[in-house]
Amino acid sequence: MTNPLLKYYRIPKLYVKLPSNGDYYPDGFLDTSLNGELPVYPLTVKDQILLKTPDALFNGESLLNVIKNCVPGITDPKLLVEPDIKQLVLAIRVASSGATLEFTSACPKCHTSHNFDVNISHMTETFVDSVPDNTVNLDDQLIVHLRPYNFIQRHLQILNELEESKIIKMVEARQDLDENGKAVELGKHVDSMADRTLSLMALSVESVTIVSTSESVTDPKYIEDFIKGITPNQANVIMDKVRELNAQGPDLTSRFHCDNCGHEWDQMLDVDPTSFFG
Ligand SMILES: [Zn+2]
């Protein structure tokens, strides 16, 4: 028999577009029956409990599950890129608790603390509709095609950071070493740290085109080996572009006004899931 409670189940509260326009995903990634718009459902109580866990690693996993649950039109959320993650976090917040976000901030000039009500529902429509150029040119020889960080990279980045702080703590705690000995010991780990950072970066490279032959290299192993041998200058060019791509998506800045001294300032909302869903 059909569950008689079925018609009391959650219904979608709003429909949003993805800032990436689906460009970075494999075919069939998006189930968009409504002209490119995805239905967004409100959080369940279970979602809310998952999101309140302060552990960064666990929290990333929770957000992944919450997106699966609230935006079922996305078949494989771990491939979602940063601008789209921001957009969906915003949309799920609007679908669950409405358009107003209460926000406490101190005036940067007179330091008076204020409570503000920020309307966040319009923010889901603030992204620039055209996807930016995602290529960089390395010394006129290679064209590197990039994409923003996705969930898999977010997770790896947290793991890297945990690993690094563990190593530093371990070395700092060594009673048998003086400052110089500690520096030498840390130096032994620098190589593997750099390797992990570069592997993370390599995951943002979709392909590399060789200008002289127009050959396009897409094999992830070839790409990773290549990235591990690039110069610091080339690495900076690539990372600057990846950061630019990560920063796309909804505009999360709001303008605030201080009643005490009249000062006005812009501030970006923090959409970190532990605090953002309240
Ligand atoms: Zn003020």
Image: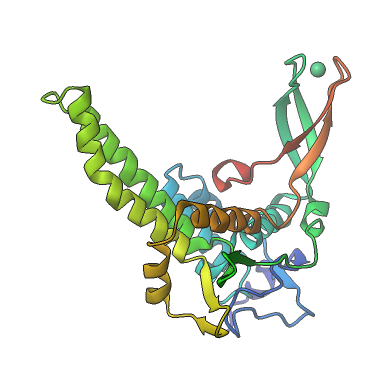
Looking at the picture, how far across and down is residue 244, in whole percent?
Answer: 65, 55
Quarter of the figure with residue 141: bottom right
How many numbered badges does the structure rendering display?
0
| 142 in relation to 267, above or below | below
Colour scheme: rainbow
Quarter of the figure with residue 2: bottom right
Looking at the picture, how far across and down is residue 28, in whole percent?
Answer: 60, 85
**Which residue is painted at 77% across and 64% down in the image?**
14
Quarter of the N terminus within the rendering: bottom right
| 262 in relation to 173, above or below | above
Q: Nearer the viewer, residue 65 or 137?
A: 137
Q: Nearer the viewer, residue 16 or 44?
A: 16
Quarter of the figure with residue 220: bottom left
**Which residue is painted at 57% across and 56% down in the image?**
237
Looking at the picture, how far across and down is residue 136, in whole percent?
Answer: 61, 65
Q: Nearer the viewer, residue 243 or 121?
A: 243
Looking at the picture, how far across and down is residue 26, in whole percent?
Answer: 57, 81
Task: Name, please, the residue furthest toward the left.
Answer: 176
- Where in the image, quadrant-wise, is ligand 1 located? top right
**Which residue is painted at 65% across and 81% down in the image?**
31
Q: Nearer the viewer, residue 18 or 177?
A: 177
| 42 in relation to 112, above or below | below
Residue 224 visible, this angle: yes
Residue 277 visible, this angle: no
Quarter of the C terminus within the rendering: top right
**Which residue is painted at 55% across and 59% down in the image?**
238
